Every structure is written in structure tokens, then in C-alpha cells.
Amino acid sequence: MEILINHRVISDSPYNGDNEDIFVFDDEELISQIKQEIINGTPTCFLVSGYRGVGKTSFIRRVEQDIKKENSKVVFIKLNVAKYESYSLLLRKIIREVYLSISETQDINELKKQNNEIITSLELLFERTFHEVLSSQKSSFKHETTSSVNIQINIKKLSVAILTLLIAALNIQFNLTDWFVNLKTNKYIDLILLGISALWVAIELFSVKNTINKNKTDFLEISRKTLYDDEIAEYQLNKTLKDLNTLGIQPVFIIDELDKIDENEKIEALIGELKPLMLSGLASFILVSGQNLYYKFHTAHILDDALIASIFSKTLHIPLWSTKKFFELFSKIVSDSNLANEKNIVNYVKSKILNSNRLPRRFLNLIRQDLVWKDKKAYIEVLEEDAQVYITDAKLLEIIDEIQENELLTLGYSEGIVDFFISQLHIWVQRMKLKGNSFFCKDDIYNLENDYKTTHPSWYFTKLNSLVISLLEKLVDSGLLEKKIEKSDDGEEILYFKWTEQASIKTEALIDEDDELKSRFLMNFIEFEKYLREIYQDIFKDNNSRFSITQMIKSLIEIELLPKRWVTDNQLNSIIRLRNKIVHGEIITSQELDLVQNYAFEINKIKAHLIEEYTYYVTKRHLEQYNYFTTKELSYDKNSKFLFDFVARNKSFNVPDVLFEVKVLNAPYSALRYHLYKYLEGLEEYNSHSGKYNYLVFIIYSQNGRKIYDKFKEQLERILLEEFPRLQGYILSYYNSEYRGDANQSRLKIFLEDIVKKIKN
């Protein structure tokens, strides 16, 4: 079916006056109150919150448009802080936006006539935000003296000089000139020659070089800079705002896109740096944020000196749209508004509302995805084959509306809190839809630890738990979900849910139902095989084992760790065969696929039984050396069923018995308190029949870390303190550390020895 629409009406942009047809503002009185407060009241700070895509920016633009019609002197200055980096850059951005907003909305020439100095100062301040002018004065004096002495010797010249000196000396002594040339010379001439020769030798021996340099440098560079640092910039901005007030201009800062800043620390830093300006009384501030800041504001009163508690005088929450508002919007989109009342179109619209999580932007995007174009006209294509999907989604939305009406609105919660709970209901439905035809439990769609932050008040969590239970119950009552109760080995009931044939589920994610079932089955089998292999390696000390699952089971049966029926168990053998077929990519029949779905839950029971048998085997053989015999069959009364997994009794009757309960906790224990009461009451009953104080030992295994064990132990200690103080000291617990293998008999033996010592003492 194709429905002609007014495609020009659909817009992705926020409200701007030209596209007002698609915007539905329910609370006109709220808009009027804000408008009057900004125009007639003193400057203040508003916090506008809401989910992304709900229409916060459109709401602010509507307020802005209405104010401009009444008072042209109110100037809105928009700041986008989605990429906030530093206060220095933010100051520059604020100054620029002040100037640009004044220029765009006011007559600059008229303002100059009123006070030319103010406008000129604003223009100069605006210009300086783009230019960084360095201002420096440098003066330096440099005086440098260098002195050096160099001694150089030329052997050749020195030899000639020495020879000459020697000849001159011999000539004086022996008158060689007279003897060789028969020439009578003057004695003084000989002395002069001797002196010259000696001087020559001295010059050749010593060569001294002395250098003195002097250098003086003076330079002076002077320039000016008006905007030196953040403090001066902040001063100039405050002065500018005061000047604008004298001209009758009322600045209103809109700080938008705060919800795009994912780190709460950055948001708090930004608000902290803007606080002096926000509380200056020179301008009003409207901060547009997401839900996180809303939660922080509403919990700030319980914190000591919280920053945001004293800044905002009024908070405005833009709520999620009601079903009625979406239908009003849809009637504006279609060319024939009467079509919006047809049953199949109603289901189509409800389906889009459900999948949009009640966000108008998301709703319009989903409508766009169904557009088809013919001859320059746009149509919404409502597929006949999806009719059952639309019916299912419509029922789901109606159930959420019912919960909202009866369990949320009647309690008087604020709009922001109601939106939080409604949003969670939509998210849970989407998660359930992603499960396809697989079974799921409550923890698969509602995870308190991973999904919710500490910024939420603690009472939220109690309400969330009641809401998810209510949602599941209503879906079961409506016939959309079927419920299956599985019992663990200790009798704990676990509720599993699955979509019925009445529900036609379709999501944007691709779901291969068969592959999903196989994947769930294999994941559980892999966990079982891991435990089996670790137990085998721990018992036989064979870390390089490549034995098959069947071989390992047979080996454990031979040493009486497992009962013989494990070999002949048809269910276990069928599980192993299915596992091999899936792993090797063989074709699985429809009958086998049904078994895959059922066995996904049975594997967990087999795993728990394996761990219990292993613990019993190690305990029994180790305590034998301390004169204990361990059994699973002994009960204190022929007409009663033995409550615990096994008991170790000393051959001496006066020695206390040790009762053992083995637990595999891979998820939070939903009925933990009830079962702990049952075990502690069972211990007291056992004590009354045996006539002595006995010990109860919980042995806990978990692949999901120590947190689960810590919660178990915390709950146990609380119950002992409040209800069973007489049993304190007789309840012990042991945990297999996540830093080791899940099977480690050496550690278990040490723990058992500690128990024996405790009993002796």
C-alpha cells in the first residue's frame, strides 16, 4: 500500500519558523512563562534537558522567535560547545558571537549614534580575537675578551738557528773567521752575530699569540597587545555586557550541544569556568543538555557543595512525545489526514513510534526509510507482508502506554524521571526482539551493573526491577511471550521467556534464528567441555591431553569420579552427537534443531552435576586420612530427604559433621536470600537431630569473576548476623579464584585441612 505524503513537510532541521508544520508544542503556557521571565525578569540561568532528538533545540528556537516578536532588544547569542577544548578559546568564541549577534539583529549605525564608543570598543574587541599581537621589550649587552698563548716549534728552522748560534760561539772562542779566510774581524761584530743567532733560536722556540675581542649589542623592540590573558579577556567581556545593558540590549546566551560532550568532567569544568559570567547578572543563560546533567542536578542536593546545585534557577525538561503527538505529526505528513485513522495505518504508525523510542527525529528518519518516489511525488510504502509485524509492534506500544499510565504517571514523578523509565521500557522491548525465537531470561535484557550509572538515585533501581517484571508479565498475559520455568540442581526456579507464534518480530538487525540457536547451544557446550577438560587434567595431571569428551568421561568413570550412567545416558550422548554435527558443518534436521534449543539449557545442569561429582570425589578421598567417611546417601531421618549435596562424618561420634553444598554461580543469584534461609534452617534441623553443632560449607565455582562470590558472601554474612547469630563460626565458604583454573584439587585440599584444624581447635 502506498500513501501520498507532503514530502516538503518532512525536515531534519530544528524549528525555524518555515517548517513549523511538523512541530507540535503541547505546553504553550510553559513557552509563555519563559518568554515573560526573559523579557521582564532579571537575568538568570536555565537548564533545558531531554533525550537527544526529542526537540530541545526546536523548543528554544520557538521561544526565541516568540520573544523577538515582542522585544527586539533581546539578543540571543548561540554557542555550540560540542567540541569544548579550553576556556581561553571559549572566551574568544563568546566575544565573537556577541559581536556577530549584535550585528545581525540590531542596527549598528543607530547604536553608534547612541554611543559610538561602546560599539567601536566592541568592534575592536571582536577584531582582536582573531589576531595575537606579541608585545616584548628586549635589551642585552655583550662584552667578550679572548686571550690565548700558542707555542709552536719548527724543527728545521730551529736546527739551522742552533747551528748558527754554535758557529757564532765557536768563532768568538777560536777566531774561526781568521783561520778559514785569514780575515781579521772586529770582536764586537762577532758578539753581535752571536746575539742575533741566540735571538733567532728564542723566536723559533716560543711563538705567543694574544687576542682580545670586545662586543656590545643593544636592541629594543616594542609593540603593544591589549588582550593579554584570560583574566583581561573576561574583564573586557563583562565590560562589554555592561555597556550593552546601558544601550537597552538584553543578551541571552544559549549554550547548546552539551549532550554531545560524553565526559561529565568536561561538562562540569565548562560550567565551573562559566560560573562567574553566568552569575554576573549581566545576561541570561540557557544551557541545553542531555539526561545526564538532569540526573546530576536532581541529585546535587544530597552532595556536599555541589557546583550545579546553586547555578540554575529553573530547569525545563523537554519530554518524550506521547503517542497522540506522533499521530498529530503523521496527520500533517500525509496528504489525506483521514488515512491516519485506518486500522492498518494506525498499526504502521505505532510500529514506527515503538522503534523510534518516542524520539521525533528518529520517527521521521524511520518514515524516510519507507519513502518511494514516483513522478516527482513521494509515497510511504506500507508493505502487506509486514502487517503482522505492525500488529505486534502496536500491541507492544500499547502495553508500554498502559504501564506508563498505571505505574508511572499516577506516582507523581517529574517528567524527566518518567522519561527515563519509558525509555528503558522501549530499550528492553528492542533487546527482547533481538532474541528472535530464542529463550531469554530477565538478566538478558536488564543488567543493573552494566546498563546504569551511579548518577542515578538508588531508588531508581528498585523501580526498574518492578517495571521489567511488570513488562514481562503483561507480555505473557497478552500471549506475545511464553514462559518456561527451569529448575537448577538446587531447586532454584529460573524463568525463561520466548516469543510465541502470535508475535511477529522484525528488527533492523539481521537475525538467523537457526544460527542463533546453534550459537547458544555451542557456547554452553564449550563451557561444559572446559570444566570437563580441566577436571580431567587436574585429576590425571595430563596437561597435554587431546582426548575426546567421551574418552575423558570414561576415564573419570573408571576412577569412580563419575557414575557409570554417564556412558549410557542417552541425553548426554545425543548432546555430544549434535555438537559434533554443528562443529563439522553438517546439516541439522528440524527435529534436531528442536533438540538443540532444549539441550542449550540441559547442558548447564550437566555441567553443575560434573562439578559436584568432582568436588565430592576430592573431598571424600582427602578426608579419609583424617578418619572421616563422606557420603551422599546419609540422612538424619528415614522419612526426610537429605537437603545438602554430601556430608563428611568422623568415626568419632562426638566430632561435628561437615555438610557440603556445591554451587555454580555464573550470574547474579536472583533467589539467593530465600535459598540461604533454606540451607541455614536445614542446618539447624540437622543439628537438632544429631544433637551437636555441625559445620556447613559452601563451595562456590564461577567463571565470571569474584564479584558474584563477594555478593554471595555479603548476603550470607548479613543473614547470619540478623537471623542466625547462633550459627556464626559454623558456616564456611570456599571460592575457586578466577586467576586459576576452575578445577584445582590442591587448593581445595588445603581448604579441607583448614576445616579439620578448625574442628579440632
Image: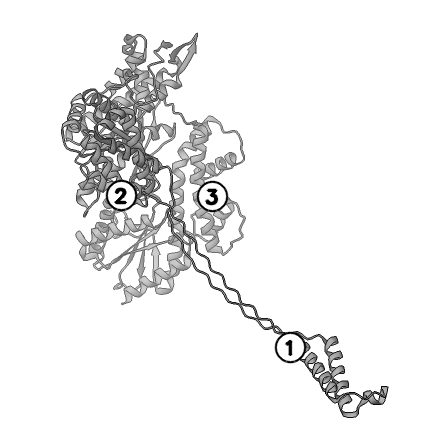
Which is nearer the N-term, disc 1 or disc 2? Answer: 1
Q: In screen coordinates, is 212 left or right of 268?
A: right
Q: Residues within 10 Å of mark 1 (few under 14, many from 20)?
A: few
Q: Which residue is mark 1?
A: 206
Q: In screen coordinates, is 420 left or right of 133?
A: left
What SS does tag 3 mark? helix
What SS does tag 1 mark? loop
Residue type at the position of mark 1 = Phe
Label 2 near label 3: C-beta < 8 Å? Answer: no
Which is nearer the N-term, disc 3 or disc 2? Answer: 2
Q: Residues within 10 Å of mark 3 (few under 14, many from 20)?
A: some
Q: Residue at x 28, y 15 (%)?
A: 21
Screen quadrant of the C terminus: bottom left
Residue type at the position of mark 2 = Glu
Specify whether residue 254 is in view: yes
270 or 187, which lies in front? 187
Q: Which residue is mark 3?
A: 567
Mark 3 and mark 2: span between their CA atoms? 72 Å
- Residue 212, given in percent of the width and then of the height, sits at 53, 67
Q: Which residue is mark 2?
A: 273
Q: Residue at x 18, y 25 (%)?
A: 35
Residue type at the position of mark 3 = Val
